[in-house]
Image: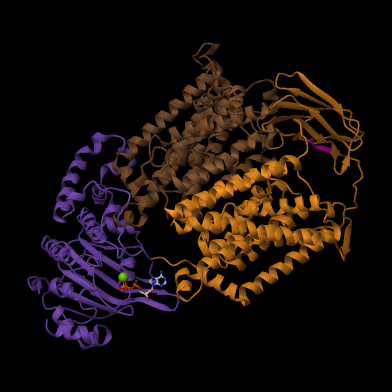
Amino acid sequence: MLMNLFAEIDVSKLFGLALRTSIGVQAATFALAAVGLNLHYGYTGLLNFGVVAFMAAGAYGMAIFFTQGWLGGSILLAIASGLAFAVIIALSIGLPSLRLRADYLALTTIAIAEVLRISFRSQRLLDLTGGPFGLPSIEDRNANVSFADVITVDWNPIGKGNYGAWFLEFDEKTLWVMIIGWSLVSLASLLIWGLMRSPWGRVIKAIREDEDAARALGKNVFSYKLQSLIIGGVIASLAGIVRAFDMGFVETQQFRPQTTFFIWTVLILGGAASIWGPIIGSMTFWFVIIFSEELLRQMVDSGWIPEAILKSNDIASVRMILMGIMLATLMIWRPQGLVGKKEEAQIDVR
Amino acid sequence: MGKRLKLVSSFIFLVLGLLLCLPIAANAQSDNELTIRGTVRVGRDVIPDVQILVTDAQDTEIGAVTTGEDGKWEIPIPGLGEYTVTLVGPLPEGVSVKEGATDQVVVNVEEYRSKAVGFQLTGEDKKPILEIPPTWERLLNRMVSGLKVGLLVALASIGLSLIFGVTGLVNFAHSEMVAFGAVIALLLESTTGLTGALFPLVILIAVLAGGGLGYGLEKGIFGPLRRRKMTNISLMVVSIGLAFLMRYMILIYHGAEPETFESFRIQSGVSFGPIELPAKDYFIIAISFTTLLLVGILLQRTKLGTSMRAVSDNPALAESSGIDVNRTIMWVWIFGSALASLGGTMIGLTQVVEWQMGEKILLLIFAAVTLGGLGTAFGAMVGGLAIGFASETSTFWLDNDLKFLIALAVMIVILLVRPRGILGVRERLG
Amino acid sequence: MSDNKSSELGNVEPTPGSTKLDPILTIDNVVRSFGGLRAVDIDHLEVQRGIITAFIGPNGAGKTTLFNLITGFDKPDSGQWTFHQLANAKSWTTDLSGLRPHQIANKGMVRTFQLTKSLAKMTVLDNMLLGAAEQKGESLRNALFTSRWRQQENTILRKAEDLLERFKLSHMRDEYAATLSGGQRKLLEMARALMSEPKLILLDEPMAGVNPVLVESLLVHIENLRDEGVSVLFIEHDMDAIMGISDWIVVLAEGQVIAEGTPSDVSKNPAVIDAYLGSAIAEELKDV
Ligand SMILES: Nc1ncnc2c1ncn2[C@@H]1O[C@H](COP(=O)(O)OP(=O)(O)OP(=O)(O)O)[C@@H](O)[C@H]1O
Ligand SMILES: [Mg+2]
């Protein structure tokens, strides 16, 4: 029976697909968002359940600016406006709510993220955000015109063609966005590393441990939290922007609350409060998800798992179930994740 | 070490139990191949004999059909991806595409299930199906249906608030417990034939199942974890994981298609003065109202209610005055989950039963509970009524898609200016 | 009994709210009530510079609440309090009421907590380094440029090691603060507060839970502090410690100052004995 299974399974495809996704753009964007969340939650102890608000702010800020053709529709200015939008979101979340208790902050942030998403989706903003259809508009998408073209075609230094081999073969567009994505991950991680080894980082960690102690020592806790929220938020918004370049469009469906929880899983899997955590977490996360999904698919397709138990239609849902199980069990048995320090495993923010 | 083992085994047990539902899932689900489908309608009228064309991203034609008598159409597609659906026509005299909308819709099929597509049409000289009653009458009807939604949200919220009260846990899986009730009830109705006059039995069993689920969650997961001194923040993250587990179990189990209860499918309106509601709404309002009343009495008058409130106020004090705290917490889980299940069934009755029910109602429940004050059952009732009423009645003036915004805005404002809610007491620092 | 500081006190009257020669802190009409309970209700109180002042009073007298109020961690219903930065310069004063905790700390008035707040998942050394005030590297502008803060960091590091040595915590330098004993945490918290070189340090029950041998050395530290010019205000229940090192005692009961004076004044005050000390301790005090 077991031999039979091995004969049916395309092992090369199994590992190939899993590996491909774990180094792909998606993994890079999740890692980037997790780097931002790591500063919020891992180091500062802010329970931000609205990560996706920052990603949406970045992506939509960029896309709106570009498609409206403001200031000549320069893509660099568009990206800058995406980042600026993220700063505005950070301020409007932070100024009123950073004084709240941790669980109240969690509820507030998730609510604000939903407000943002529902507003983007609203018919009233159809001209600006494309409502439920997203950006670019349907006509532009039919004509294959997107804001991503400037980056992936005009500014792409890689010649047309396919690179790599086996399942790790990428066309020049994907490869270029991958390079951009992982470079941003490295830069952001480097930035966090530099910050966290400085006295600034020491205050940030102290706030995570005990706000009142930091206050008693003369640190302006509110201001530090706001700084953390802004820096982490801008990093997460970059993730939204890279993702938009990869997909070629933005749509509110991409920014449902579940994306936030994916990123939480990535961070906790890798290890909060560690520099490598988000990167290792994202790569492992996607490897595990795609590996198990593909394995199930092959087992179902080969009839090894009977249709009565699982249908190929439902395999996509198994991904979400896996995520749920990972999140819960990691929190219980390995809160420090794969590479986090056990002593610093952050499970009791107030 | 024995404890740890017990914890591990009960957790695995629970997950396995849920996974065992999978085989049933396959039976419960109809064959659905990958399609794009829809119904062409203007107002309440369906439009037959209109041609629909589906093309893929490369603009090659995938298929074309004309709508049937019932205005429905369905076109199989070869796989996931982006498709353009075009309304070719011809449209009946006087019917046209709404201003601002197009006769082309781009859909992105991301999941292996059929995707519904609609076109926005208006008919200028089409007679409205119903005579439009005067404004005040419509507003009144809106408000009554707001009351109904309020009662339902209140019903669904109490458990969350009670559980927060006695344990301090913000349970993100609560809304899935609501969805669980609806799905179980639907399954019962369709498999056992308990329809019509026997339907109350279905409700009863769904409520019992909800209580059982609460018992299982406390016994298998949250109780042991709490005793391991896991913090409420960590437990909250665990509950998020659990919510996803449950939500997608429900998807596999129930399928992607929204369904309605057979017993309540055809409903004519029943007038009551100027108020006209489907008959089932009276039933729903009556049941919800009575239940809320009973809950109030239970909390105020019974020993269990007293100990629940005592544990909410101060667990240490309650413990020292001879109350069995763990037992009380267990009852709160059972009771809260049963109520969630009832709320879910009722919500399923008014609308449809679908796997995303939990996700949709989650923030509404949170809004209700924070408005009333986390941890107080009466707060949840008042908050639920207010949130349900306000968001439902707001559709009289505002777009339908903005009604959630009302609830969320209320929640954010309350958290910012008075996080203890309207009925909550300020927590003691230090 | 330390009478070496009586010169600074001069002949201050041992009556509640008496005027001091050179106050570092004056409190006026500070009221804080919780529901119906008036936890703190102080008409006027002055704290003398350069000496050790003890706050005593029964449990629930409002001592901690008063600390919370004057350090900005809690808001009073009404009242003002002022900080006198320089000795004998009545003109250079700062109104502290309404300031936020970190602003008050930065004025030179630093507190510790009754329930220790050591930063458990940071090392003992990092706890200490955090205490230093006005660090360049703590601003985002400089954080990434090591050269801008390296030198200051080294100075702070030496100071931290010095203090750790004095508080017998050197061997724990690189351990997580979570591994310290309750008494060691009290020490760490006090040492950390000293890193900022405060003018006035407020200690909430610094000896609670510390073993008697360490208490001895803690008392010596506190006296040394005073001799270095730091004004000390501390809450304590340990009578021996209080009588041993304080220069001035303020007695609180039910939120009000019911007596103040030197240890010998206070121990003779019948109101204190009635309202607070109870017969057993009163007996003990008679011997002092
Ligand atoms: N946040 C609060 N809410 C309600 N009452 C409070 C609060 N904080 C303090 N109290 C009450 O105020 C009174 C003074 O408390 P406080 O902690 O200041 O006493 P204390 O003198 O420090 O006592 P101890 O010596 O036991 O530390 C007590 O009766 C206490 O119950
Ligand atoms: Mg105290």
Dominant secondary structure, magenta: loop
Q: Is residue A234 visible in this depiction of the protein?
A: no
Any magenta on residue B67? Answer: no
Q: Write the residue at 69% across / 71% down.
A: B294
x, y percentage for residue C165?
14, 52
Residue C18 vs C133, above or below: the answer is below
| Quarter occupied by residue C281 | bottom left
Q: Which chain does orange denote in the image?
A: B
x, y percentage for residue B225?
48, 55
Q: Colour of chain C?
A: purple
Residue B105 vs B232, above or below: the answer is above
Q: Write the residue at 65% across / 72% down.
A: B296
In-front residue for pair A320/B372? A320
Q: With A284 as the anchor, is C123 left or right in this view?
A: left
Any magenta on residue B119? Answer: yes
Give the residues drawn in magenta, as a range.
Answer: B117-122
Quadrant of the displayed image that contains ligand 1: bottom left
x, y percentage for residue C41?
34, 77
Q: Which chain does brown denote in the image?
A: A
Residue C277 vs B115, above or below: the answer is below
Residue B187 vs A10, above or below: the answer is below
x, y percentage for residue A24?
52, 25
